[in-house]
Amino acid sequence: MANLLQLNRWNHRMLMNMYNPNSNNMRQSKIRSKIAYKQTPISSNSPVMVLNNCNIDYKKGVKYLVDNSKNMKMVPLEFVLPIPEGERPSMAIDGSIPVIDMSGLNGPVVQQRLSTIHAISSACAEWGFFRLEFPQVTNHGIKESLMDEMVQVVEEFFNLPLEEKMKYGSDDVMDPVRYGTSLTTTRKHALHWRDFLRHYGGLTPHTYHLWPANPPAYRDVAKEYLKEVWQLAVIIFGAISEGLGLDPNYIESSLGDEGTQLVISNYYPACPEPNKTLGLAPHSDHGGLTIVMDNGIHGLQIKHNQTWYSVPSIPGTFVVNLGDFLEVLSNGKYKSIEHRAIVNTEAARISIAVGHGPKMDAIVQPASPLIKEKSESKYRPIIYKDYIRAQQSTIKRGKSALDEIMNNNI
Ligand SMILES: O=C(O)CCC(=O)C(=O)O
Ligand SMILES: [Fe+2]
């Protein structure tokens, strides 16, 4: 019963915030400190790859490359990735992916709520991924018009002149605001067909003043969108906590006073040879939950039982990825999902992925109520920011960073 009340309180909070434009998420209201961050510029001695047929510095991004190479018929060699024959993007299947009807969590019927929690728990254990369905569109509290506006300002950002975007260019994964291309680890690797903008949301010490100043509506729209997405994440964290047999606010509290919210907007231009490259290599996300939407062009693929599945793009809806933090917290009961982004010949795809994880100096380890003895823990404890650095700098992909902190791999 206590659990029920708690969840209803969250729902209430979400609804209050939804209808009151002046209200602030409780967490956000705690955040007052304005920390001045120093932006790390892209190092001038970082490798500059000049693409054979276009003579373009790849650091300028794939969009710039495509916009300045009319009638490109082939993918430049630097972007050709060693994709195993059986894993070519076009070979992914359209299978049935778990769908969660969120109205079950909001409703007054206890049985319906419990069966929704059970459905979320099964999806987390078997897939680490689910689509959210909202029979009455407003159920998730995020208006479709706000989702559209967010896609719009992100698109306008990527359409800005290069000099404007490069003001946010950075190679340091810890910089609070970063524009970049490919994977932009400092290691040399084949390039990916993707430009990105990523920055913290409103929960970490406030970085709002560092977000892109252009397009002019960007900051306001992103702030509103990220606030709403955080509230949705809290509801899902609550259901997941309950599904694990934990207190409903266990995961939310384990994020620390100021959990980390990170928004990654990806721009994947149309590509002449989509079977030869990828927008994003196979990876799992480092945080707890990533809530993703796109501009109606599909391109997300997930790996389940060694098979790649195409995720349909349905306007006005979200998909949810479980990240490594939750796999570790659940001591392996739930799985983070390996996923990748493919590209297509027809249209540019924009995806907006919002990750929710613990504060940077949190220790990532299994939830103590889930293990009776230390030896039952399947993962070595690690500081969240060290894990992010390790994951982002590895040239191995898939879930290799997570494998490295599994106890049996020491
Ligand atoms: O483009 C997508 O749908 C996925 C993006 C993604 O996986 C990420 O940004 O981590
Ligand atoms: Fe991802």
Image: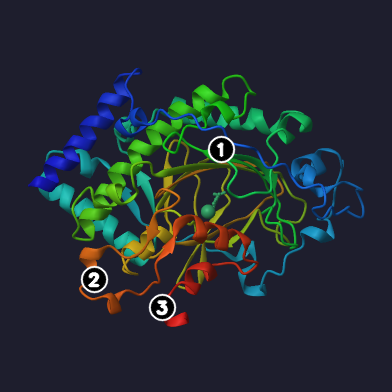
Residues packed near mark 3 inside 10 Å, few (<14), some (14 to 19) or many (20 plus):
some
Which amino acid type is shown beneath numbered disc 2? Ile
Residue 295: mark in rendering: 1
Residue 371, position as x, y percentages in the image: 24, 71
Q: Earlier in the sequence, mark 1 or mark 2?
A: 1
Q: Is residue 96 visible?
A: no
Q: Is residue 132 visible?
A: yes
Q: Nearer the viewer, mark 1 or mark 3?
A: 3
Q: Nearer the viewer, mark 1 or mark 2?
A: 2
Disc 3: which residue:
407
Above or below residue 20? Residue 238 is below
Above or below residue 291? Residue 393 is below
**SS for callout 3:** helix
Which amino acid type is shown beneath numbered disc 1? Asn
Q: Residue at x 36, y 59 (%)?
A: 326
**SS for callout 1:** loop
Q: Are marks 3 and 2 in contact (CB under 8 Å)?
A: no
Residue 176: mark in rendering: none
Residue 280, position as x, y percentages in the image: 62, 55
- Say if disc 1 is inside 8 Å of ligand 1: no
Nearest to the observer: residue 313 or residue 176 = 176
Disc 2: which residue:
371
Q: Earlier in the sequence, mark 1 or mark 3?
A: 1
Q: Quadrant of residue 346?
A: top right
Q: Residue at x 47, y 81 (%)?
A: 410
